[in-house]
């Protein structure tokens, strides 16, 4: 996650370094929730879990097109720059300042009406727009996200994530194999994790998105199908999907871990095949998974997640701070 501290890190301190004439930030939240079950409800051990945000088309393009339309409606007599996730912008902090929601204990932006299943996007504009008011923190004494995290990645007091224990980090961002002591907690997640959002009471009645691009094309796929993919088939199947971010070898390694955690003997053959892969990222995790199957067959309890040493007072972390916003904020929620 070096991109958080790379050569562009200083730009996060002032949006005017992205657009010199900026006077306002228009923040939008686009819903992506679907009607499908949550990972905490789908219990089939033969299927892998892909994070809800990656079930459909890559959100970057979808939001960018929508923001271009919104910018056009504002008229042509202003400078603007569109940002969707990839720009060095503290988007959650600005979304909070714009009144879209509060930053919850799971570090997600939570909107009182639609929950946290949202993508964020911004328009930096030279127009002067009246600022909205940040909502209060409504997490209260709730600790459901903290208690539910299988790898204890959320600090005991909340509001901080230790990436070294986060399933989403292991299965998407980490350019290598997850630590052995963490693999048992990964369960059958092959790309991302939704648990801390699924258990959030504010998502209990979350509406369903109306955006066709976010329809579920990659909901809970069979692990055996994923293990049999060639590299070309991986690229074809997940073309235009965020899942490609994990890359082929990284994704297959995730599949191997999920198979091992299933304890199902039917996965022995595909795991033996993956154990012979040239990529050590795949073969090492496949051999680990085979050992889990052996332990399960012999009545073993399976892998145990190394306990966390929370709180994270001395752990390296990236914390978004609101600071003193140099420009006004507007907001918009889109379904």
Image (cartoon, helix red, strand yellow):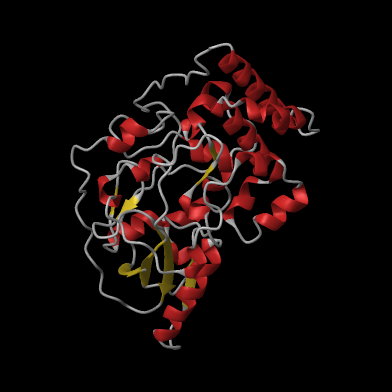
**Foreground residue among 91 and 284:** 284
**Foreground residue among 83 and 30:** 30
* Residue 130 vertical placement versus 48 (above, below): below
Residue 66 pos. (x, y %): 46, 74
Q: Quadrant of the C terminus?
A: bottom left
Residue at 55% across, 58% down: 217
Residue at 61% across, 36% down: 254
How many dots with numbers? 0
Residue 284 pos. (x, y %): 70, 25
Q: Quadrant of the N terminus?
A: top right
Quick one: which residue is furthest to the front in this view?
Answer: 266
* Residue 174 vertical placement versus 221 (above, below): above
Residue at 49% across, 37% down: 44
Residue at 40% across, 77% down: 126
- Drawn side of residue 25 relative to residue 167, left or right: left
Quick one: which residue is furthest to the bottom in this view?
Answer: 76
Residue 263 pos. (x, y %): 56, 24
Residue 211 is at least partly visible in this image: yes
Tell me where residue 61 sits by quadrant: bottom right
- Drawn side of residue 182 relative to residue 30, left or right: right
Residue 322 is at least partly visible in this image: no
Residue 309 pos. (x, y %): 39, 20
Tell me where residue 250 sits by quadrant: top right
């Amino acid at each position: 996650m070096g991109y958080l501290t790379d050569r562009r890190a200083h730009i996060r301190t002032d949006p005017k370094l992205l657009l010199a004439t900026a006077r306002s930030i228009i923040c939008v939240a686009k819903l992506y929730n679907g009607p499908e079950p949550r990972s905490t409800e789908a219990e089939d051990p033969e299927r892998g879990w892909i994070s809800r945000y990656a079930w459909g088309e890559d959100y970057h393009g979808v939001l960018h097109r929508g923001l271009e339309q919104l910018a056009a409606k504002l008229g042509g007599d202003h400078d603007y720059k569109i940002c969707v996730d990839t720009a060095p912008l503290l988007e959650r902090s600005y979304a909070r300042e714009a009144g879209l929601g509060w930053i919850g204990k799971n570090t997600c932006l939570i909107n009182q009406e639609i929950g946290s299943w949202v993508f964020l996007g911004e328009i930096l504009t030279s127009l002067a727009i009246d600022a909205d008011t940040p909502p209060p923190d409504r997490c209260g004494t709730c600790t459901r996200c903290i208690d539910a995290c299988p790898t204890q990645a959320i600090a005991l007091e909340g509001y901080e994530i230790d990436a070294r224990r986060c399933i989403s980090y292991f299965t998407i961002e980490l350019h290598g194999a997850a630590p052995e002591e963490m693999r048992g907690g990964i369960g059958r997640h092959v790309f991302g994790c939704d648990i801390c959002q699924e258990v959030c009471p504010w998502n209990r009645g979350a509406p369903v998105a109306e955006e066709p691009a976010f329809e579920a094309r990659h909901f809970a796929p069979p692990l055996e199908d994923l293990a049999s993919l060639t590299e070309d088939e991986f690229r074809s199947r997940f073309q235009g999907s965020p899942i490609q971010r994990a890359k082929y070898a990284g994704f297959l390694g995730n599949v191997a871990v999920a198979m091992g955690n299933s304890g199902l003997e039917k996965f022995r053959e595909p795991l033996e095949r993956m154990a012979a892969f040239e990529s050590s990222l795949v073969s090492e995790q496949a051999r680990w998974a085979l050992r889990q199957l052996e332990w399960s067959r012999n009545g073993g309890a399976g892998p145990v997640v190394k306990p966390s040493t929370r709180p994270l007072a001395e752990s390296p972390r990236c914390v978004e701070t609101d600071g003193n916003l140099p420009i006004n904020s507007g907001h918009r929620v889109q379904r």
